[in-house]
Image (cartoon, rainbow, N blue to C red):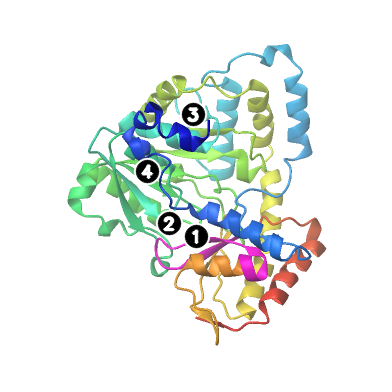
Amino acid sequence: MSIKQYQETYIQSNFAERIGGANYGKDTAIYKFEKIKRAKAAAQKDFPEIELIDMGVGEPDEMADAGIVAKLAEEAAKSENRGYADNGIPLFKEAAAKYLKEVFRVDGIDPDNEVVHSIGSKPALAMLPSCFINPGDITIMTVPGYPVLGTHTKYLGGEVYTVELRQENKFLPNLNEIPEDIARRAKLLYLNYPNNPTGATATVEFFTEVVAWAKKFDVVVVHDAPYAALTYDGLKPLSFLSIPGAKDVGIELHSLSKSYNMTGWRIGFVAGNPLIVKAFSDVKDNNDSGQFIAIQKAAVYALSHPAITEEIALKYSRRHNLLVDALNELGFTAEKPKGSFFLYVEAPKGVKGGQRFASGEDFSQFLIREKLISTVPWDDAGHFVRFSVTFIAQGEEQEKLVISEIKRRLSDVKFEF
C-alpha cells in the first residue's frame, strides 16, 4: 500500500499530537532544506554543464586525521572493545576533562561525576528536556538557531520562548529583553557559541552575565559548543565552564564532529554540573547503550591531539578570508567571523533592474537556480544567507579557484542592498 492508502486506515488517527496527530503527513508546507534540495536538482537539470558550488553544507569536507582512523581500526580489532558501552569508558571521560583543561583552561572537572559521553550532541540535546521539562515549563531558545532542544521541549508539553540574535548586538541574545514572568517560568536557556548560523563568538563578559542571570531566575544553562575550538585570528577558544559559577548553573556540550572532522562517528560529551550530568546519564541510560568503545578510544586519541583542530581551523580561516574579500568586492557587507565555519551575510534587496528578494530564501533560491551556488537562508531575525567554507577543494589553489568562480558567476549582476 502507498502512504496515501495508509492515511485512510486507523494508523493515521493513532499518531501522537506532538507530531501532528491525525493530520500527520498531510501538511503541504515544504521544509527549507527540502526546498534547497529541489532547487539544486532543478538547477543541475537545467544547467548540466555547470558544476554546482555547494556552500550550504554544514559538515566538514575532509576525512578525520589518519591517526584517528588508524586508532579506530586498531581498537575495532580488539575483542575487549566489543559489547555495550552504556554510559562510557573512564578513559574517555578522563580525556575529555584533560581536553577542557588544556584547550579551554577549565580547571576542576571531575571525570567521574562531571563528564559523560554522548552519541553526538544532537541526541544529548534531544534527551536533556526529559530531565527538566514538565507541561507548561519554558525553554528559552535563540533564533536563528539549532531547534532540537526546543522541539523536544514541545514534545513534552513545554513551551518555547525565543530571543532574536541581531546584528546590532553582535548576535548575542539580550537577556534583559526576556520578560520577568517568562524568566521565572523557564527551566532551560539554550546558547550556542561560536554560533550556527551567525558565526558569532561569545565573550567572557557575556558568559559572566549569563551566569548571574541564571542564578537570579533559577534557570539551567545548556551551552552547545560543537564549534568552540574552531577560532581564528588570535581568538582563544572559550568555554562557558571557564567562567566562575558556570558549573553551578549549567553544562556544556562538546562534539568531535566539527573540530576533528569526525562527522558520522557520533561522539561527544556533556560536562559541567554533576547533578545535571547524573540526570542526563540516567535518561541516556534509558535511550541508548553507549557508543562503540573503539570509537570512544579513537576519540581519546583525537582529544589528546588538539593540534589536529588547530590545523583544520587554519584552513577554514584561510577560506573565510578569500570568501569575505570576494563578497565585499561584489557589494556585500561581509565580516569574517572569529569562529565556526559559517559566514552569515545579509541578503540584498534585489538585482538592479531585475528580480527583487523579499527574504533570505528568495535570494538563496536565486543563487541556486540562476548561479548554481547553494547557501542556506535564515529569515528568523532579518534576511540573511549562510555560506559555509566547508566546500570541496583540495589545497589552497583549488580553494582560490572555487572562490574566483563564485565571484565570476556573481559579477554579471549588480545587487541592491
Q: Residue at x 50, y 27 (%)?
A: 116
- Look at mark 4 in the image and give the residue it sits on: 150
Q: Mark 1 touching mark 2, by CB under 8 A? A: yes
- Does residue 160 show up? yes
Real-space CA distance between mark 4 and mark 3, rounded to the nearest whole angstrom: 23 Å
Mark 4 or 3: the one toward you: 4
Using residue 272 as the reference point, say whether residue 119 is left or right of it. Answer: right
Q: Which residue is pictured at 50% across the width and 45% down the height?
A: 225
Question: Of label 1 and label 2, which has the lower sequence position?
Answer: 2
What residue is pinned by disc 2?
Answer: 144
Q: How far apart are the two marked residues, 2 and 4, measured between alpha carbons?
A: 12 Å
Q: Which secondary structure lies at badge 3?
A: strand
Image location of residue 333, percent across then percent down: 54, 76
**Of 146 and 186, the residue lying toward us:** 146
The one of 363 and 276 positioned closer to us in this rendering: 363
Q: Gap in Å between the C-alphas at discs 1 and 2?
A: 8 Å
Cα gap from disc 2 to disc 3, whole angstroms: 29 Å
Name the mark on residue 115: 3
4 and 3 marks in contact (CB < 8 Å): no
- Which residue type does callout 1 highlight? Thr
Nearest-to-viewer mark from 4 and 1? 4
Taking 403 as reference, is 121 left or right? Answer: left
Residue stretch rendered in magenta on the structure: 368-389
Q: Position of residue 345 (x, y in %)?
A: 53, 68
Between marks 3 and 1 in the image, the one whose residue lies nearer the viewer: 1
The residue type indicated by label 3 comes to Val
